Image (cartoon, rainbow, N blue to C red):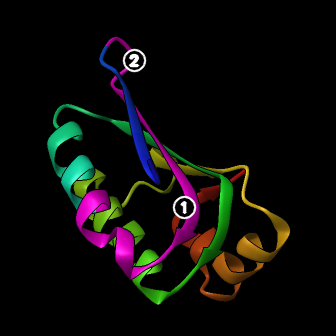
Amino acid sequence: MPVEVHKDASKSELKINVSGRFDFSLNQDFRKVSEQDAVGIKSIIVDLGRTEYVDSSALGMLLVLRDKVGDNQAAIRIVNARPDVKKILKIANFDKLFTLV
């Protein structure tokens, strides 16, 4: 499955793993899991270790996710992004909106 979610209620943390292409084809799945599972969550980890590509719709989905937890940059961490994916995130100034690890 291209979008997998793991919720740790004890830590109020949600981990979202995205595999393959993170593009508009995942829009419905990504929004569905983020809306259902983000209730009561204070921090979100988006693991892009298995993500090969991101497009502008993926960036939009990340921004919508950010709105769910507020403007706290540390609330959402984007981890394990490949160099080419990380480059796209930095060009879009996502390193100023999210914590990139």
Looking at the rendering, the stretch of residues picked out in magenta corresponds to 10-30
The residue under the point 30% across, 71% down is 27
Q: Amino acid at mark 1?
A: Phe
The residue under the point 34% across, 11% down is 10
Q: Amino acid at mark 2?
A: Lys
Q: Secondary structure at mark 1?
A: loop
The residue under the point 77% across, 79% down is 87
Instruction: Name above or below for residue 74 compared with residue 23.
Output: above
Q: Are marks 1 and 2 in contact (CB under 8 Å)?
A: no
Is 67 left, or right, of 80 in this rendering?
left
Instruction: Name above or below for residue 82 compared with residue 32.
Output: below
Instruction: Choose top left, top right, bottom left or bottom right for residue 21.
Output: bottom right
Residue beneath label 1, please? 98
Q: 61 or 27, which is in the foreground?
A: 27
Residue beneath label 2, please? 11
Gap between marks 1 and 2, in whole Å? 19 Å
